[in-house]
Image (cartoon, rainbow, N blue to C red):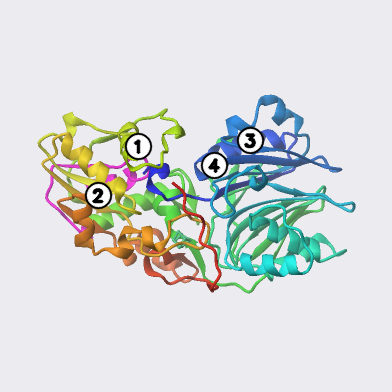
Amino acid sequence: MLAEIKGLNEECGVFAIWGHEKAAEMTYYGLHALQHRGQEGAGIVTTDGEKLNVHKGVGLINDVFSEGEVSRLQGHAAIGHVRYATQGGGGFENVQPLVFRSQTNSMALAHNGNLVNAHALKNQLEAQGSILQTTSDTEVIAHLVKRSGNVPMEEAISSALGMIKGAYAFSILTEDQLFIGLDPRGLRPLSIGRLGDAYVVASETCAFDLIGATYEREVKPGELIVIDDDGFRTKQFTSPMQRTLCSMEYVYFSRPDSDLNEKNVHASRKTMGKQLANESPIEADVVTGVPDSSISAAIGFSEATGIPYELGLIKNRYVGRTFIQPSQELREQGVKMKLSAVRGIVEGKRVVMVDDSIVRGTTSRRIVRLLKEAGATEVHVRIASPPIQNPCYYGIDTSTKGELIAANNSIEEMREIIGADTLSFLSTEGLEASIVEDRDRMQHGVCQACFTGNYPTEIYPDTVIPAYKD
Ligand code: SF4
């Protein structure tokens, strides 16, 4: 589905490398593979052992970096970040990695996720005299680290991690050390790989493939990794908890060629489509998926039912982001420019339209209309995830409850609103079974809080919902 018009957005992508003579270049390529996780800002910080070098800016990676800027970033280690502006809003000051310089040492920090107690921590820090320069909660982590005083960085970071709550996958670079950490529930994805003798870390394994690195393992929930000239060390900063990796990573956000928790995203989506077909079968002539993220589920639906899969909807590539427009009328036009129904495929046919999720319903309504205008006689909408009824507090912009169509309408009401002939969603059990193997269920659960309302962490009364965008 098309994130810009759907109102469902990932917050960030993180990349890090240690022990490579072209660290900045590798990070630049790694960030390209993660560009789908954030298009509003990008940055790279390297260390040459004596000082941190930084370049970052607002926009796509290609807007922010030229060849000269990448080669200027000298050093054997780097961290990089792409961001979508939810928590803290847009603007240059919030583009990561954030860099903090002091007389003793400097520190750069890149983070994916949302802290659920950031608001309380900010108040506490300000009351104690800290001056926050950004509106991002990432800065809170940095202040907590700095506040520990003259202790080794590893200790300072561990102490800061004891105070923050929520979802975070982060990298911290100093002049001579790289730190990698994941929240105690492992809500956000983070993997470790090797590139020759170098260590690499990325939000998604597709970044490893692009630079020729090999996957080693997932960062464990509650794990803090330290990499420096003495090698690779790891420790648990909390006692082990069951992992609850975000199920929307499998449904929608991650690239189909990535593996999360050693499970391929495309394969998981296909299983979701099969499961959906088993739960909500329908008689029809063709199955089509809403490009790009729903195609895998549509193929699964087709395989399970024997109804042929066809490219009934085509994404119009090269349509710029300038088409994101606030007015309803221009939004309608925007969808027409981003998607086309293929008349030769759908005319006179009963069409199953598989989509990954419904947020506000406006996009689904437009696509159903596109298919009907192109001559489809019936449009049966099948959604490869359960209804989104609750906001996400962990770094995904799913809108507030009032804007979520499923929070305010029954399935029959939603069917009527979007103009479909039938509408069905995948069950929460079906989604979990598509992602998690039975044998793994004890260790690797998934978060489904936006569907069920069962949040895997404490939610504070002043927990900030990421700002709604679009
Ligand atoms: S609430 Fe939903 S979007 Fe947020 S982490 Fe959980 S599954 Fe992912």
Neighbourhood count class around disc 3 (C-alpha, 10 Å): few under 14, some 14–19, many 20 upward = many
Residue 392 shows which numbered tag? none
Judge from the rendering whether residue 131 lies leftward or rightward of residue 352; answer left or right.
right
Residue drawn at x 73%, y 28% is: 71
109 or 212: nearer the viewer: 109
Neighbourhood count class around disc 4 (C-alpha, 10 Å): few under 14, some 14–19, many 20 upward = many
Q: Does the magenta stretch include residue 286?
A: yes
Q: In the displayed structure, would residue 238 be above or below residue 61?
A: below
Q: Mark 2 points at which residue?
A: 301
Q: Which amino acid does label 1 sit on?
A: Leu
Q: Name the residue under label 1.
A: 330
79 or 6: nearer the viewer: 6
Q: What residue type is labelled 2?
A: Phe
Q: Distance between the residues labelled 1 and 2?
A: 33 Å
Q: Mark 4 points at which residue?
A: 34
Do the numbered discs 4 and 2 sit on residues whose CB atoms are within 8 Å? no
Residue 366 visible (yes or no)? yes
Looking at the rendering, the stretch of residues picked out in magenta corresponds to 278-302
| Distance from mark 3 CB to nearest ligand 1 atom below 8 Å | no
Q: What residue type is labelled 3?
A: Tyr
